[in-house]
Amino acid sequence: MANVLIAGCGDLGNGVGEALASQGHRVWGLRRRPEHVRPPVQALGGDFSRPDGLPQLPPGLDTVYFIATPGRFDDEAYRLAYVEGMRNLLRALADQGQAPQRLIMVSSSSVYGVTDGSWVDESTPAEPTGFSGSRLLEAEELLRSAPWPGVVIRFGGIYGPGRNRMLRKVRGGEAVVTDPPQYSNRIHRDDCVGALVHLFGLEQPAPLYLGVDSHPCPQVELTDWLAERLGLPRPPRTAGPAGGIRGSNKRCRNDRLVASGYRFRYPDYRAGYEAILSSSC
């Protein structure tokens, strides 16, 4: 039985915590509003974005997850959540004499500044062009400098229950796709949770994984498929920049994660969105 801390116990953290607790591990979830931590995960109130915001942590932690969620999409929010959050968490672990065997950080494929549609894997240099990727990379580097083993998983765009922005836009006739097409990468929320639990159980994980499903595709392919599935007109096309609105146009490989033994519940967007549409009927 392991002692597990989930620093940033939101939707993904609660899912991971519930899965690990069901396996018999002791799990604590840390967040600013601890009333939103779901049993059987034990709630801790704290704010890792502040130097004085962390409580006394449970003793003898074996695994620590870092799953930050910025409150806004701007540079200061990302700096506080990721950079200061990681710095403060690492300091608290050291000051309190903790010796975790593994720290697992959720990052993002936005650290890659690729805009030409080419393939990306864990060996591709991380050269972010936006503030979000830059702040995430700063936090990753802090983790790498820590005295304990660290694992980073860079997720693509997360969709699923409560994360259906694209589906809502297609339904509402608000989706617009760019020409030339832009590649996008995604992963279902349940596979995010599954991959994070999988990394907990690996005997010798690699230091870095890409967390995306097995079918990167042009955004137009996804929106056209959703429109057809919903019986709606295809979204209009418009001229757009080479890297899309947020400077992204790449195809991410999940070979390393699959080779480690993880099996996707939803290996492509069709499987994932069919499950969402079926559950909403």
Image (spheres, rainbow, N blue to C red):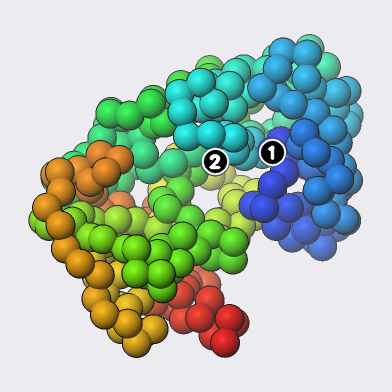
Amino acid type indicated by mark 2 = Val
Q: Is residue 5 above or below residue 148?
A: below
Per the rendering, the mark at residue 93 is none
Q: Earlier in the sequence, mark 1 or mark 2?
A: 1
Please tell me in which quadrant of the rendered image residue 83 appears.
top right
Q: Is residue 132 above or below residue 220?
A: above
Please tell me in which quadrant of the rendered image residue 70 appears.
top right
Q: Do labels 1 and 2 touch, CB within 8 Å?
A: yes
Q: Where is mark 1, residue-wise?
A: 8
Q: How many C-alpha atoms fall within 10 Å of the one at disc 2: few (<14), some, or many (≥20)?
A: many
Question: Could you tell me residue 217's position as x and y percent?
Answer: 26, 64
Residue in front for this viewpoint, 218 or 251: 218
Q: Where is mark 2, residue-wise?
A: 106
Q: Residue at x 47, y 34 (%)?
A: 73
Q: Residue at x 40, y 58 (%)?
A: 186
The answer to whether residue 67 is left or right of residue 242 is right
Question: Could you tell me residue 106's position as x and y percent?
Answer: 54, 41
Question: Could you tell me residue 8's position as x and y percent?
Answer: 69, 38
Question: Could you tell me residue 216's position as x and y percent?
Answer: 29, 61
Query: How many numbered badges does the structure rendering display?
Result: 2
Residue 105 visible from this viewpoint: no
- Disc 1 element: loop
